[in-house]
Image (cartoon, rainbow, N blue to C red):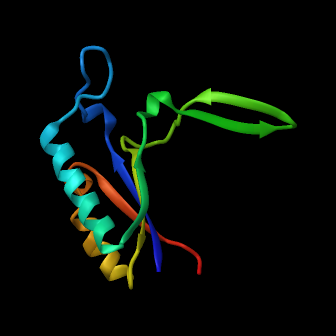
Amino acid sequence: MKFLMIHRIDEAAMPLAADGTDEEDPAADAELDAWVEEMEASGVKLHGGRLRPVRDARIVRVRAGEVLISDGPFAETKEQIAGFDVLECASMEEAIQIASRHPTTRMGTCELRPFWQ
């Protein structure tokens, strides 16, 4: 079964560098790199990526034929989508075990959504 693992974090709680860019945390980066390397080597992680901060996002809508673009997103939540992975697992239980080892789960959440077969 394929699963989309959506990483969510509270960007307000993340440190920013003086120039407004994301602060690099070498220990956190190393931990994430180790998880990615292990999951790719096992064949569980098929694809994934880290997303730019929500301040760089745009919302696109079409209403009455007009394209409307706004800054966004404007969700009623403190957490924003920070990244994603596509996993290939035998079951939801295996996907949960894999997700529980991802570093994001200690500062945010990971949502697991099965793909339609």
Rendering quarter of residue 88: bottom left
Residue at the right extreme, as displayed: 65
Residue at the front extreme, as displayed: 41
Number of numbered discs present? 0
Query: Compared to 79, does 69 lie above or below?
Result: above
Quadrant location, the C terminus: bottom right
Query: Compared to 56, does 39 lie above or below?
Result: below
Residue at the bottom extreme, as displayed: 90
Query: Compared to 110, does 77 lie above or below?
Result: above
At 47% from the left and 80% from the top, the residue drawn is 1
Residue at the left extreme, as displayed: 27
Residue 108: x %, y % from top left: 27, 50
Name the foreground residue: 63 vs 32.
32
Name the foreground residue: 9 vs 102.
102
Residue 10: x %, y % from top left: 31, 40
8 displayed left or right of 58: left
Query: Compared to 73, does 110 lie above or below?
Result: below
Residue 30: x %, y % from top left: 17, 47
At 22% from the left and 29% from the top, the residue drawn is 15
Residue 90: x %, y % from top left: 39, 85
At 34% from the left and 59% from the top, the residue drawn is 110
14 displayed left or right of 69: left
